[in-house]
Amino acid sequence: MFLSIKNIPKLSWSSERSINLKPKFSTFFFLLFGLTLFGLGEGLLIVSFAGASPWSVLAQGIASKVDFSTGIITIFISMVVLLLWLPLKQKPGIGTILNAIIIGLMIDVCIKFAPTPENYIFQILLAIIAVLTVGLGGGIYLVANLGSGPRDGLMVGLQKKTNLPIAVVRAFIEITVMSIGWYLGGIVGIGTLLFAFGIGPSVALGLYLVEKTFNY
């Protein structure tokens, strides 16, 4: 079962090390492809108007208490999360940098070009598709092993420390972040709950599908 996955699969196109400035073309391609899907999913979730992701809720909550925008707070949060990598012995790579750039660009593209469904049911369906897309994209780019984004690196590091399934670790992180953000004043919607409870299983499913589909 994909829900019991505890390790990031290593395939023929995975980088041998996360700090690799000259990866194989296939490795770099899957990194970009995965990050693009990840950003597409994040953008579709925002466009769905069903609720932002838990980390955005946290940023909203903090921004309501201090004189900074949600975007600036998001950058600060990423920096703090990167500091949490130190005791977890996680190492950044080119994927860590590209994570912020590509996902940010894809979110802007979705907001500009993707329409919001007028029917509430379709908004929820779009939110579900968004969470699954983030999970698949996350699975692809994590297997590339060229450095994870701040939040995914935290997930991987905690999984190694606890030896719990990835789905459980990611769900715990997202639910904790969502709860803190909501307490501070962030806005929680159905899409937020879908992301918080669904992203762990979605990433695990993404890893499973990548291993079964792109293992050559």
Image: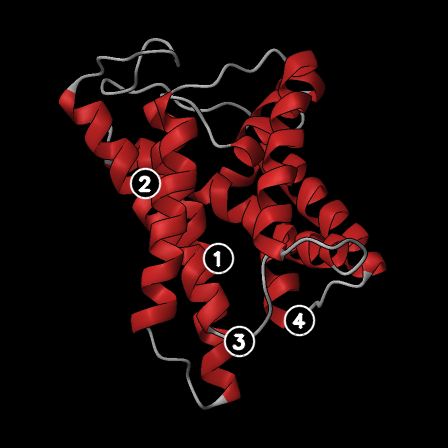
Crowdedness near tag 3: few (<14), some (14–19) or many (≥20) residues, C-alpha within 10 Å: some
Q: Give the mark, 1 or 2, whose residue is nearer the N terminus.
A: 2
Q: Which residue is mark 2?
A: 34
Mark 1 in CB contact with mark 4 (< 8 angstroms): no
Q: Secondary structure at mark 1?
A: helix
- The CA distance from mark 3 to mark 1 is 13 Å
Q: Amino acid at mark 4?
A: Gly
- Residue at 63 percent across and 20 percent down: it is 85
Judging depth in this view, the residue of 121 and 147 nearest the camera is: 147
- The CA distance from mark 3 to mark 2 is 24 Å
Numbered tag placed on residue 66 in the rendering: none
Q: Give the mark, 3 or 4, whose residue is nearer the N terminus.
A: 3
Numbered tag placed on residue 131 in the rendering: 1
Q: Give the mark, 3 or 2, whose residue is nearer the N terminus.
A: 2
Q: Which residue is mark 4?
A: 189
Q: Give the mark, 1 or 4, whose residue is nearer the N terminus.
A: 1
Q: Is residue 12 among what the camera can see? A: yes
